[in-house]
Image (tube, rainbow, N blue to C red):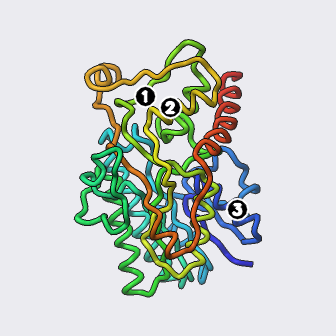
């Protein structure tokens, strides 16, 4: 039985990854600072260790000698309201960097056979993402570096950390840059949710004839990948001989207003979009509107070349599945 350790398995992507690997017969150990919010531990793993991975002793406990695979998804992160206000920058950089420093060191010490690190498209230069219709997120465009957030800078640093451990200590690594992964069993309210969850929640909550709030002018573009395809892409990368870095995301670009309208259409409600920006946003929230770069879209040519597979699920299909789940969560919450 293959021994798999998932750091950050109490989170959204980590939980889905753990569930998939357990179903395939792996012995799955999860370590996270929090319990999974939506799954019982026995549904997704054999062992769940609740601990703080910024502490070296915790990482020493979690990572076992000669483990077959480690998946490092643990990070301090969230949606635009968490990453782009600037209020959480120190915690984001400090906590995530400490985790990766601890994990890389311990994997070498324990002779781990292979480790996956989840980087982010947020590490791409801001100047390559100013045109919402023509963003440049090809892997080779990462330098000269200029991420639009401290979260992106930390991701870039940690990529380099794992590649340095690969060169100097022969740590077998795989690094992928995630582009906006979404789906059920993930954060859907409270300020750390990503755009698809936020739009679907707002559509579920909003009454007929009212409007849903969209931050900014809504013309900024993104692509969003359904979590099942993300997990499949990660596992195929791990089986390949390509170290990375490589994008894992969808090439189906959509504006944020387009995403909001898709959520409205799925809800079958007569509601509209209210764009909030500029001084109106500052007056309401007390900080500038955190919309991020103007355009970001995954470029999958390198993944297809090196791994020989491509994602193909339409955004609408994933959004419908996610709406069903979020709408059920809203109903449950409102009953309390």
2 vs 3, front mark:
2
Q: Which residue is mark 1?
A: 214
Q: Which residue is mark 2?
A: 260
Q: Is residue 100 visible?
A: yes
Task: Give the spatial CA distance, label 2 vs label 3.
Answer: 30 Å
First along the sequence among labels 2 and 3: 3
The residue located at (53%, 82%) in the rendering is 241
Left or right position of 153 against 250: left
The residue located at (36%, 50%) in the rendering is 91
Residue 136's spot in the image, x, y percent?
33, 57
Count the marks: 3
User: Residue 62 occupies which quadrant of the picture?
Assistant: bottom right
First along the sequence among labels 2 and 1: 1
The residue located at (55%, 27%) in the rendering is 202
Q: Nearer the viewer, residue 57 or 72?
A: 72
Q: Nearer the viewer, residue 211 or 331?
A: 211
Are dots 2 and 1 in contact, CB under 8 Å? yes
Q: Which residue is mark 3?
A: 20
Task: Give the spatial CA distance, label 1 vs label 3.
Answer: 34 Å
Left or right position of 99 against 235: left
Are dots 2 and 3 in contact, CB under 8 Å? no
1 vs 3, front mark:
1
């Amino acid at each position: 039985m293959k021994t798999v350790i998932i750091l950050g398995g109490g989170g959204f992507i980590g939980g889905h990854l753990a569930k998939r690997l357990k179903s395939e017969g792996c012995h799955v150990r999860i370590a996270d600072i929090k319990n999974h919010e939506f799954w019982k531990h026995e549904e997704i793993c054999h062992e769940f260790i609740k601990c703080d991975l910024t502490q070296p002793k915790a990482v020493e406990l979690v990572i076992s000698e000669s483990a077959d695979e480690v998946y490092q998804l643990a990070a301090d992160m969230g949606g635009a309201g968490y990453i782009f206000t600037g209020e959480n920058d120190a915690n984001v950089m400090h906590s995530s960097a400490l985790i990766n420093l601890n994990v890389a060191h311990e994997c070498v010490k324990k002779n781990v056979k292979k480790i996956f690190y989840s980087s982010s498209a947020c590490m791409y230069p801001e100047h390559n993402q100013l045109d919402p219709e023509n963003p440049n997120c090809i892997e080779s465009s990462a330098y000269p570096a200029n991420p639009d957030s401290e979260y992106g800078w930390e991701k870039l640093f940690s990529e380099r950390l794992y590649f340095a451990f690969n060169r100097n200590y022969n740590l077998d690594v795989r690094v992928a840059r995630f582009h906006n992964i979404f789906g059920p069993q993930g954060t859907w309210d409270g300020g750390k949710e990503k755009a698809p969850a936020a739009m679907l929640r707002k559509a579920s909550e909003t009454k007929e004839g009212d409007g849903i709030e969209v931050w900014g002018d809504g013309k900024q573009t993104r692509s969003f990948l359904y979590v099942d395809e993300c997990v499949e892409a990660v596992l195929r990368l791990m089986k390949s001989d390509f170290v990375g870095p490589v994008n894992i995301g969808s090439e189906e670009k959509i504006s944020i207003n387009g995403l909001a309208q898709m959520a409205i259409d799925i809800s079958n409600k007569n509601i509209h979009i209210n764009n909030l920006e500029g001084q109106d946003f500052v007056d309401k929230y007390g900080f500038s509107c955190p919309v991020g770069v103007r355009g970001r879209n995954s470029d999958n040519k390198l993944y297809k070349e090196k791994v020989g597979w491509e994602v193909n699920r339409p955004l609408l299909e994933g959004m419908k599945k996610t709406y069903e789940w979020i709408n059920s969560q809203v109903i449950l919450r409102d009953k309390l």
